[in-house]
Amino acid sequence: MLDPSITPHQHQSIALDLRGIRKSYGKVEALKGIDLKVRAGEFVTILGPSGSGKSSLLKIVAGFEMPDVGDVLVRGREVTHLPASARDIGMVFQNFALFPHLTVERNVAFPLEMRKVPRAEIARRVEDTLRLVSLSGYGSRYPRQLSGGQQQRVALARAVVFEPKLLLLDEPFSALDRKLREAMQIEVKELQNRLGLTTVFITHDQEEALIMSDQVAVMDEGVIQQFGAPDDIYHRPNNRQVAEFVGDSNLFEGALVREGGVATLHVDEALAIDLGVRDCGRDADARARVLIRPEAVRLAPAAREPRSLPATVESVIFLGPNTKYIVRTEQGHVFTSRTSTMGPASFAVGDQVDVVLAAESWRVLGEETAAPRGVL
Amino acid sequence: MLAVDNTLAHSRSAVHRKRHLLGPGILAAILLAAPALIVLGIFFFYPLFMLFFQSFEGGTFASYAEIATNPVYLNVFLKTFKIAVIVAAVDLVLAYPLAFYLARASTAVRALGFFLVLLPLWTSQLVRTYAWMVLLGRNGVINRALMGAGLIETPLPLLNNEFAVVVGMSHILLPFMILPIYGAVAKLDRTLADAAYGMGASHLQVIRRIYLPLTAPGILAGVALVFVLSLGAFIMPALLGGGRVPVIPLLIEQQTTRFLNWPFSGALSAVLLFLVLLLFWLLNKAAARLAGGRGNG
């Protein structure tokens, strides 16, 4: 039965394998060739704005839709054309999708009843799973008698009680308020670790993605723009889409000039960005786009450091532990800077400052994979 | 200071709410309901009461005893209820899939669907009943088509029997089944079915375990409406039954207009009304149990 092209080792370690998935709705191409491998036990997030294709991809993995082209393999078994009911995948829906006419117990028992598990075993497993999500004693309640967080836990219990091959989470926290959301994020992550469940998590919330994931796949315009660990995604984004979607960015485009190993990006006559000694893997005079994160942009009181850009503070946004400054240089370039509230200097709107940029903090971005949307 | 203000505001709003509930609210309700209540009182409750009163003419229960003991009347009651059960069942089977289709259809299709469903309600019942006579008659459209196609040699007995009454009533009462069921189906959250499929449920299990229980209130309402309306239907049994399908409304009409036996027709009406009310009470209890099954929070 096993695919001979897959070695036993691979067979065990890849829980979900998407190969060249394409899907169109009418003339709209939602997925333009998705390849993704999720290792067993990993927590992988598919992060993207609405309309990026992430929901279509989820439906294809779950079995609610079929791809036009491509294969879906779960634990080495090809399931592309199997209905959802035959895939053995647990799923938590955005609105939880609890059955309103069934008690918590009966909700959690549902997947076991569908699998014709003996009655006594159902009772035992439901009780164990409810304990796992700290809902012992809530079995006889109805979903509408529970709080949002409790409903979420029931949905989670129902998705894991039958020991699925894969757990899918479809923006499960978006219905919760911030405090509860943060608590549930930790809880879900712990549960996932404890059960060793391979999990695919769909979200548009980049913070959530960075907090929870082992690997993040940033999706936009029907393409996975980058697949990597959260810190890779944040510090070493592949392209503008990823940089813009994950975190705040200062992005500049210009002509790349290399002299004696030192690279400089000429944005215009007024701004030349020193990128330091680096091999950008590009020809001289090529167009390039560079990124610096706001926390690497330092502001200094005016005219103290020699190598800096004079600028005026345009707005100050207090974020609690951090303060975000938006400043405009005399030549009209805008920078966003984020500093710790506890830091040495603080500025007010209208203050004259110098923008200090460390050459090594710049990141030269790669080519974009899809057509650019509007210019920065 | 703030706390005091808060409690003050709270108690003030509580007082406000109380006044709203007990004071002008009740008066407004009475005033708003008065015209309808007066009309109903004079033209419905008063005659009904008079009819009921007359059924005891001479201070005896003779009419009721006659109904209870004469098998002819018992049979008429049984036949009436049997037809109502069949009509409700036929309409349920026809309406449920259609209501589902309408709830899932695009806006344009749904608008057209509703137009077609409601169209019969805008035409006279008499006209629709005559239309069925044209279709079902000995030389009607159906018989002629079947004979023309060589499928049958002699016309089928389609008219002037129970079959014709059931067909006509099912058609005319169908909208009363579709509308409440549509209401229940439209409220269904589609992800519930997806969730069930994802947990391994088959199509049949999704219908039985998810759709049916969640749309049960709509089904119950539709069944109750169609059932009661078919118990009281007069035109269709009269015209399509051709006098060979005796049902209670026909019996009542016969007793009043032909035999001028007001006490007996009053007793028949009272028994029918009692049975309908009993039925409603039972359905209500069933509905309450369904709702109770959803928790009492």
Image: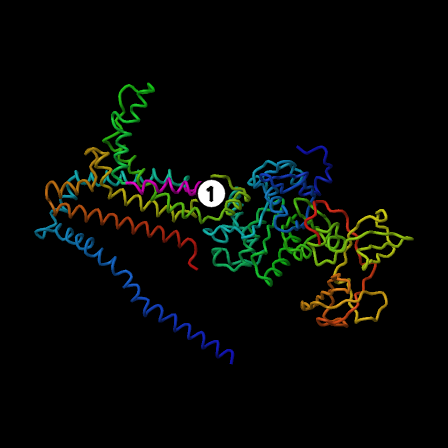
Q: Residue furthest bottom?
A: B1
Who is closer to the viewer here, A216 or B31?
B31
Q: Where does the C terminus of chain B fall, quadrant-wise?
A: bottom left
Q: Residue at x 23, y 31 (%)?
A: B160
The residue at the point 74 percent across, 58 percent down is A250
Q: Nearer the viewer, residue B177 or A189?
A: B177
Left or right: B173 as drawn, with respect to A285: left
From this viewpoint, is residue A322 visible?
no
- The residue where tag 1 is placed is B104
Q: Position of residue A347 (x, y in %)?
A: 73, 72
Position of residue B76 in the picture relative to residue A254 (left or right): left
Residue B151 in sight from this viewpoint: yes
User: What type of secondary structure mainly makes up the magenta span?
Assistant: helix
Seen in the picture, residue A232 relative to A68 is either above or below; the reply is below
Say whether residue B113 is magenta.
yes
Residue range highlighted in magenta = B99-123
**Residue type, numbered disc 1:** Arg
Disc 1 is attached to a residue of which chain? B
In the rendered structure, the answer to whether residue A332 lies left or right of residue A192 reads right
Residue B26, given in percent of the width and then of the height, sits at 30, 66
Residue A177 percent across, percent down from the top left: 57, 61
Q: Residues within 10 Å of mark 1 (few under 14, many from 20)?
A: some
The one nearer the camera, A365 or A200, is A365
Residue B31 lies in what quarter of the image? bottom left
